[in-house]
Amino acid sequence: MTVVGNDAGLLDAADPLAHLRERFHPTPGGTVHLNGGSLGRLPAATAALVDDVVREQWGDGLAEARTLWFDLCERMGDRVAEVALGAGPGEVVVGDCTSVNLYKLAAAALDAAPERRTIITDDDNFPTDQYVLAGVAAERGGALRRLHADPDQGLDLDLLREALDDSVALVSLSLVSCRSGALLDVAEVQRIAHAAGALVLWDLSHAAGAVPVDLAANGADLAVGSTYKHLFAGPGAPAFLYVRRDLHSVLSQPIHGWYGHREQLAMRGDYDPDPTIRRFLTGSPPVLSLMATGAGLDVIAEAGLPALRAKSIALTGYLQELLEPTELRLASPADPARRGAHVTYEHPRAAELVPLLARNGVFVDHSVPNRLRLTPAPLSTRFTDVAEAAGRIREVLGGSSS
Ligand SMILES: *Cc1c(COP(=O)(O)O)cnc(C)c1O
């Protein structure tokens, strides 16, 4: 263990992102948080930023406050696009939750191709995605086809190639599997779907802020995703929605509201959708959460996604080294470059290990069936934290096996 500790110290000393750890609210001494895949850490700047919005903009500036916020969904969308998604200005808005955004875009895609009634996803996709997609298909007399994805290795793209035919309007997949972390190839999936005349709707909830996505460079059609995981926006913060610019005029989402109207404040009785990305909005956004989203984006922008990704690969690779061999079975692709920011292990008593580990100061996520999801957030986790966590996991496993 001494050798390992020294390695970790050297890795920390050489880490170009080490200083960014201070940009997050400190965790209680002696604890290691590997559960940022469910709710990202609190940026140190968030509290003052929200306080300022509440006291100055809302409290003192009541009269102008509402007009300050009218284009906030787009302004924050542009920032998310630039920092995390590799999308252009005017292609992303932030508002509503991921499930609702998924509904809007899946429905829009089906409505734009009335001769095609099938949606394809995989059975490892996050449950809300499967529910929403099945509902959208059923509502339109169509069906959701669920391909079987290996829960550890992710979807085999040959299955997708075979499943596509001219009944398929939409393929909807998570870029990074919430269970295994398995990472898909955006450009390749887009190519396969386009060859069959289908659109692709990505769920980037576990990808945005964790891996470079490059939506524009990869010709991505549509995407949605959470801001409260790897973008640190805080509990309940609204999700983002991306529509490639040339699709704005082709797609029409089904939840018509005043925020999507061409002349929001004209108060006309007839719905006339805005020609821009605004047409995918519906109503007033949660302004406090939306403003808070900026704090995490600033830290990510300072790090830069390529450097963040490089450290993330090094951290999960190191963690993997330190946990071999144990009675934990790797339930993720073995190559860190083939997964997102988390690595998953299976253990028959995973559910009991989660609180045991927490009592020992190591916080991890539980995932079904029998899995521990470990997310060493690259902006706030040191290699020494990973070494400490691995040591305690080994102790807990040793102590609980008898
Ligand atoms: C976290 C997550 C969601 C969350 O959806 P909400 O509607 O915002 O609660 C959706 N999809 C995936 C893949 C997720 O990881």
Image: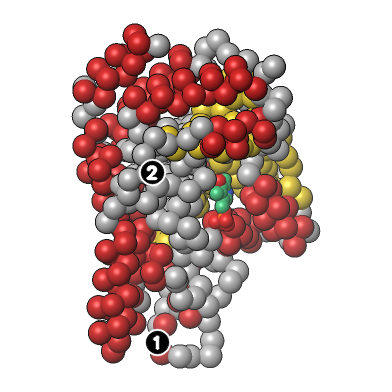
Q: Is residue 315 left or right of residue 320?
A: left
Number of the label disc, if any, that sits on residue 265: 1
| Position of residue 331 measured from the top left corner of the image (x, y, whole percent) | 61, 23
| Position of residue 283 measured from the top left corner of the image (x, y, whole percent) | 49, 75
Label 2 sits on a secondary structure element that is: loop
- Rendering quarter of residue 316: top left
Dot 2 beta carbon under 8 Å from ligand 1: no
Label 2 packing within 10 angstroms: few (<14), some (14-19), many (20+): few
- Say which quadrant the N terminus sits in: top left
Q: Is residue 191 above or below residue 220?
A: above
- Rendering quarter of residue 368: top right
Seen from the viewer's position, the closer of residues 87 and 374 is 374
Q: How many numbered marks, from 0 up?
A: 2
Seen from the viewer's position, the closer of residues 390 and 300 is 390
| Position of residue 269 measured from the top left corner of the image (x, y, whole percent) | 53, 90
Q: Is residue 143 left or right of residue 309?
A: right
| Position of residue 36 measured from the top left corner of the image (x, y, whole percent) | 46, 42
**Distance CA(mark 2)–CA(mark 1):** 48 Å
Residue 32 seen by the camera: yes
Badge 2 is on which residue?
A: 28
